[in-house]
Image (cartoon, grey):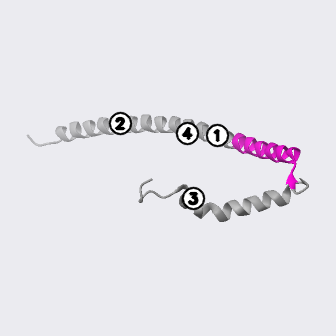
């Protein structure tokens, strides 16, 4: 290993307090049998984690769908605004041409 390359232990050192807190919480909240967590308790904890993650993912997907719908609506609004802008520009060109024509009528020869 190169001297400048940090070891795995060095890289994980800042996470040690967080890991220790999580381990203590898990040990305190899990039923034990002779000081060790039971398989059933571990499975129940994993099932709860899975259910929470599934609910979170479902809400996240619903939010994505909602945002996509809003994005489509905004794109339609933008397209309509562009059409209105083009129509206004055309009207301005028409009015400018008419104004130029009228000014030409009243010019002295």
As drawn, 25 above or below 44: below
Which label lies toward us, 4 or 3?
A: 3
Marked residue nearer the N-terminal end (1 or 2): 1
Residue nearer the viewer, 22 or 54: 22
- Name the residue at the front extreme: 1
Q: Secondary structure at mark 4?
A: helix
Where does residue 93 sit, x and y in percent of width and height?
29, 37
- Name the residue at the right extreme: 33
Which label lies toward us, 2 or 3?
A: 3
User: Does the CB distance between marks 1 and 2 fall below 8 Å?
Assistant: no
Q: Where is mark 1, residue-wise? A: 66
Which range of residues does the magenta coloring cover?
36-59
The label shown at residue 91 is 2
Q: Secondary structure at mark 1?
A: helix
Residue nearer the viewer, 70 or 103: 70
Q: Secondary structure at mark 2?
A: helix
Q: Residue at x 22, y 39 (%)?
A: 100
Q: Residue at x 58, y 58 (%)?
A: 12
Q: Where is mark 4, residue-wise? A: 71
User: Does the CB distance between marks 3 and 1 fall below 8 Å?
Assistant: no
Q: Where is mark 3, residue-wise? A: 9
Where does residue 67 sit, x and y in percent of width and height?
60, 41
């Amino acid at each position: 290993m190169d001297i400048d390359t940090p070891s795995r232990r060095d890289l994980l050192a800042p996470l040690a307090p967080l890991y220790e807190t999580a381990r203590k919480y898990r040990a305190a909240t899990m039923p034990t049998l002779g000081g060790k967590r039971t398989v059933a308790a571990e499975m129940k904890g994993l099932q709860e984690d899975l259910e929470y993650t599934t609910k979170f993912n479902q809400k996240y997907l619903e939010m994505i769908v909602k945002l996509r719908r809003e994005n489509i609506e905004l794109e339609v609004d933008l397209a309509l605004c562009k059409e209105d802008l083009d129509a206004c520009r055309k009207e301005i060109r028409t009015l400018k041409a008419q104004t130029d024509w009228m000014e030409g009528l009243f010019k002295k020869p």
